[in-house]
Image (spheres, rainbow, N blue to C red):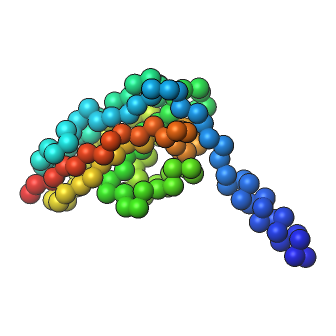
Amino acid sequence: MKAASILAAAAVLAAASVSATPAPEGARVYFITPADGEVLGPEFTVRFGLEGMGVAPAGVEMANTGHHHLLINADPMPDLAAPLPASDQVRHFGGGQTETRLSLPPGDYRLQLVLGDHLHAPHQPPVMSEPIHIRVAD
């Protein structure tokens, strides 16, 4: 019985693991807007930039493509060797969106972009932006 439990646990772990999708050399993701240090109103647009790769919706497996994930005050950072979890701190844009409209309460925020593959897992090496810091004013 003990061996069967170990085998079952190993099967669950194997099913949960994701093989790494390679990132092409020189690929980068970045913010078009807002700019680092910008002070914004409570509602603003975030535009995502991407070089060296294309955008494809989640679930579409194509070489050198991915979709955007926006990290908002993600602390700790999500595990970049596993599919990114959806939460208030990790926003998924699995439809292939390249911009979004955010509404945030006043305060200071750290934003960062991470490109995910067809299974929401970061490429290896991860294609992620430098973090930017913004302030949302009243």
Q: What residue sits 19% from the left and 57% below the top?
A: 108
**Quick check: 118 left or right of 110?**
right
- Image location (x, y in percent) of residue 88: 37, 58
Q: Nearer the viewer, residue 40 or 134?
A: 134
The furthest residue to the bottom:
1
Query: From where the camera sits, is residue 40 visible?
Result: yes
Q: Can you see residue 59?
A: no
83 vs 103, left or right, is right
Residue 77 in the image: state x and y as whole percent.
42, 56
Q: For the point 87% across and 76% down, which residue is it?
A: 2
| In-front residue for pair 57/131 | 131
Q: Position of residue 90 (x, y in %)?
A: 41, 53
Q: Decide: is 80 above or below 95.
A: below
**95 sits to left or right of 83:** left
The tally of labels here is 0
Q: Based on the displayed image, in which of its 4 quarters is residue 1 positioned? A: bottom right
Q: Residue furthest left?
A: 138
Q: Position of residue 6 (x, y in %)?
A: 82, 69
Viewport quadrant of the C terminus: bottom left
| For residue 23, above or below residue 75 | above
Residue sitting at 58 percent across and 33 percent down? 22
Q: Residue at x 21, y 39 (%)?
A: 34
